[in-house]
Amino acid sequence: MKAVYLPTLLCTAHIAIANPPDSQSVLTGPYLGQPPVGVTAKPFAPGIVNTKQWGDAGGFSPDMNTFYLARWRHTADAKQPKSAIYENVNNVWHKTIMPEGFRKPIFSPDGKRKYFGAKYRELTANGWSDMKSLGPAFEKIPIMGLSASAKGTLVMDERTSDGQGVLRYSTLVNGIHQSPKPLSKTINTGKWNAHPFIAPDESYILWDSVRESGYGSSDLYISFRQDNGTWGKAINLGSKVNTPAEEGGPHITPDGKYLFFNRMVPDKNGKEGAQSDLFWIDAQLIEDLRPTRHPS
């Protein structure tokens, strides 16, 4: 069964900012204080985000001042992990354990909407609205991963047990999300198509998929929007990202600088199987793959 990345559950609990960590582990600066990564994918924040015990995934809020760290067990006998939230206050990252049931929301690029599968909340003058539904057509889809563009276009997957689910999109017209439609066959080919990410400007879509032309298991792919509005052929992100192991959950940091994704790596405790670690790489990789447009 394919791994699941970045689960999202609703929680309305207030998150209090914890005291800063001790002086030997204070995290300062952007990206949880991690040195910039280059054109080789590396684990993100080893020992802080990636651990030996659990599967780890995460992502930043639109203003890059909050990092949501999601953790889960790989075996039933493992200790229940604790997910966390890191808040950047005065250039120091403060860690708080997530309340039970809380997971990372999916934000719109402007930070004014938070999506939870087929539901969402809007930022108003009085704070976050009550939960709203995207509509019956969305409620029928077991949405696992979702992403929104700056214009409000949504792309989403569906949780399945056989890998035959399709990726869909929904445009925003007069403030109303239209019924989801399947993306083109250039994207919906192969099996286990999941975890789509649409660029804020809608110039490309990232996702993970299992295809005969891949590196072994699930790989990351990208499709660029063509001049005529259609989606171009699926391009494998290549050996800088993909391996014979399973890669998934791609997303670009809100500042556009880095690609984050998960990889199933050998269990660090020496047990059989693998666990999911969060990796990152310079998003220049995307530009290097972007087709050159010739003047007409």
Image (tube, rainbow, N blue to C red):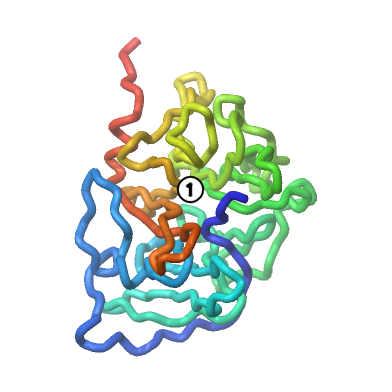
Question: Horizontal and vertical percent for residue 17?
Answer: 41, 85
**Which residue does the image show at 67% across and 47% down from the upper left?**
158
Query: In the picture provided, is 94 more to the left or to the right than 250?
Result: left
Figure quadrant of residue 125: bottom right
Quarter of the image where the C terminus is located = top left
Question: Horizontal and vertical percent for residue 65?
Answer: 35, 68
Location of residue 292 with respect to 214 vertically, above or below = above
Please indicate, yes or no, whether residue 216 appears anywhere in the rendered image.
yes
**Which residue does the image show at 39% across and 40% down from the upper left?**
242
**Callout 1 amino acid:** Gly
* Few, some or many residues within 10 Å of mark 1 (<14, 14–19, 20+): many
Location of residue 16 with respect to 258 vertically, above or below = below
The kind of secondary structure element at disc 1 is strand
Residue at image mark 1:
248
Q: Nearer the viewer, residue 112 or 222?
A: 222
Q: Nearer the viewer, residue 111 or 240?
A: 240
Instruction: Give the total of numbered labels.
Output: 1
Query: In the picture provided, is 55 more to the left or to the right than 142?
Result: left
Question: Horizontal and vertical percent for residue 177?
Answer: 67, 45
Figure quadrant of residue 53: bottom left
**Which residue does the image show at 44% across and 75% down from the upper left?**
85
Location of residue 128 with respect to 239 vertically, above or below = below
